Image: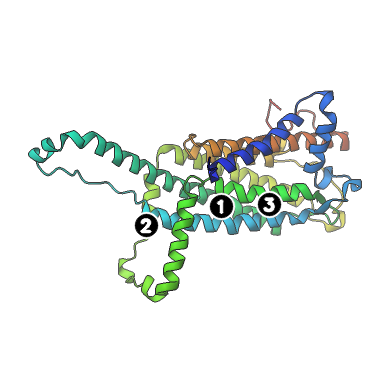
């Protein structure tokens, strides 16, 4: 049995999520396993200096987002051009010009309609993938900007090398999961375009008068997406804006480089409710992607499941660290979900 890209991604998300779920079970029999998983996930303030043997600088976080920007940009452009050329969202005219033609073709009307409906659904899902990748591009670009200009990482801040490799995997697999159903077709289309470019050259491939180039052909189909895509976008940017605010708060705590190794209690925005509001915002962002996708793609659900499990697990440890570090830490704050956890 041939294993496709979709199956590999789903298996990868399951394999990454299950150990975190098991480690989250409150059982004394799992303490050793929990500490093992936690050791891989620790970074920054919750990583002790004695754990630095297999670690890398925390400012290598920028590698995640540099990869995400390059990879997502490639997938977005390739999928967008594939959608424009191979999956146009246009209304097909009724094929029967007269009543007689309609009657003689009545036996094939149902099958023909079903075929056109299936093709239209396929084209719609391709453009939906373009929309999801466009949202992911906004996220990746902002996170790259923040790691360079917003965060002031302590020189001693480290993260486990396994966590570093896991981050690289995540930002390679997450954008791909948003378009994996069509990725093989898109890659084949891109290779064909490159081959055609090599054979014909750019002068012959792109001999299009300026008056004939219409940007609306690239943007218009996105306007035809259903209501769930726009609701998902609203949820996405709600989380996106709050994560930007929370990261700005965290970055402002280290504006004095002489106090780079000192920690203070953050306040403001969602910090007034939870210890890791930037993680909560990340969950909201990916919830927006699930809604924008229509909620029918199992791969995207598994991606979302990993995000929730991973961030909830990390937030719990961060919350415990705050409680141990500060005697005056607000006791009414939750770890990541207000009034719940």
Q: Is residue 46 visible?
A: yes
Residue at image mark 2:
85
Nearest-to-viewer mark from 3 and 1: 3
Q: CA distance from mark 2 to mark 1?
A: 24 Å
Foreground of the two, 176 or 317 = 176
| Spot occupied by residue 302 in the image (x, y as percentages of width and height) | 59, 36
Give the x, y percent position of residue 324. 87, 34
Q: Which residue is mark 1?
A: 138
Distance, label 3 to label 2, CA atoms, is 32 Å
Question: Is label 1 in a helix, a strand or a loop?
Answer: helix
* The image quarter in which residue 8 lies: top right
Q: Is residue 110 left or right of residue 54?
A: left
Mark 3 or mark 2, earlier in chain: 2
Q: Residues within 10 Å of mark 3 (few under 14, many from 20)?
A: some
Q: Where is residue 100 shown, x and y percent of the image? A: 7, 38
Pinpoint residue 174: horizontal percent, then vertical percent.
Answer: 59, 46
Of the numbered discs in the image, which one, if any, rests on residue 282? none
SS for callout 3: helix
Q: State left or right for residue 153 relative to residue 242.
A: right
Identify the residue position indicated by label 3 in the image. Answer: 168
| Residue 283, above or below 24 | below
């Amino acid at each position: 049995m041939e294993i496709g890209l979709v199956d590999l991604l789903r298996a990868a998300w399951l394999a990454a999520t299950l150990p975190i779920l098991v480690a989250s079970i409150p059982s004394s029999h799992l303490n050793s396993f929990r500490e093992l998983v936690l050791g891989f996930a620790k970074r920054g303030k919750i990583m002790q200096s004695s754990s630095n043997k297999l670690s890398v600088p925390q400012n290598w976080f920028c590698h995640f987002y540099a990869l995400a920007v390059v990879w997502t940009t490639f997938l977005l452009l390739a999928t967008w051009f594939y959608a424009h050329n191979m999956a146009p969202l246009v209304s097909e005219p009724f094929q029967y010009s007269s009543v007689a033609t309609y009657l003689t073709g009545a036996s094939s009307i149902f099958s023909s309609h079903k075929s056109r409906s299936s093709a239209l659904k396929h084209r719609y899902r391709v453009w939906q993938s373009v929309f999801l990748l466009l949202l992911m591009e906004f996220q990746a670009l902002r996170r790259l900007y923040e790691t360079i200009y917003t965060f002031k990482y302590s020189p001693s801040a480290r993260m486990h090398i396994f966590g570093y490799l896991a981050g690289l995997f995540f930002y390679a697999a997450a954008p791909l999961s948003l378009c994996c159903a069509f990725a093989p077709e898109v890659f084949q289309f891109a290779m064909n375009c490159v081959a055609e470019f090599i054979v014909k050259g750019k002068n012959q491939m792109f001999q299009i008068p300026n008056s004939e180039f219409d940007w609306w052909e690239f943007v218009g189909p996105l306007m035809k997406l259903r209501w769930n895509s726009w609701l998902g976008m609203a949820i996405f940017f709600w989380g996106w804006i709050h994560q930007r605010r929370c990261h700005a708060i965290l970055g402002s705590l280290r504006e004095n480089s002489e106090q780079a190794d000192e920690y203070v209690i953050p306040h403001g925005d969602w910090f007034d409710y939870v210890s890791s509001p930037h993680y909560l915002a990340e969950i909201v962002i990916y919830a927006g992607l699930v809604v924008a996708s229509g909620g029918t793609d199992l791969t995207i659900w598994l991606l979302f499941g990993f995000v929730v499990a991973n961030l909830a697990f990390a937030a719990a440890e961060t919350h415990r660290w705050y409680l141990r570090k500060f005697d005056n830490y607000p006791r009414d704050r939750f770890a990541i979900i207000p009034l719940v956890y």
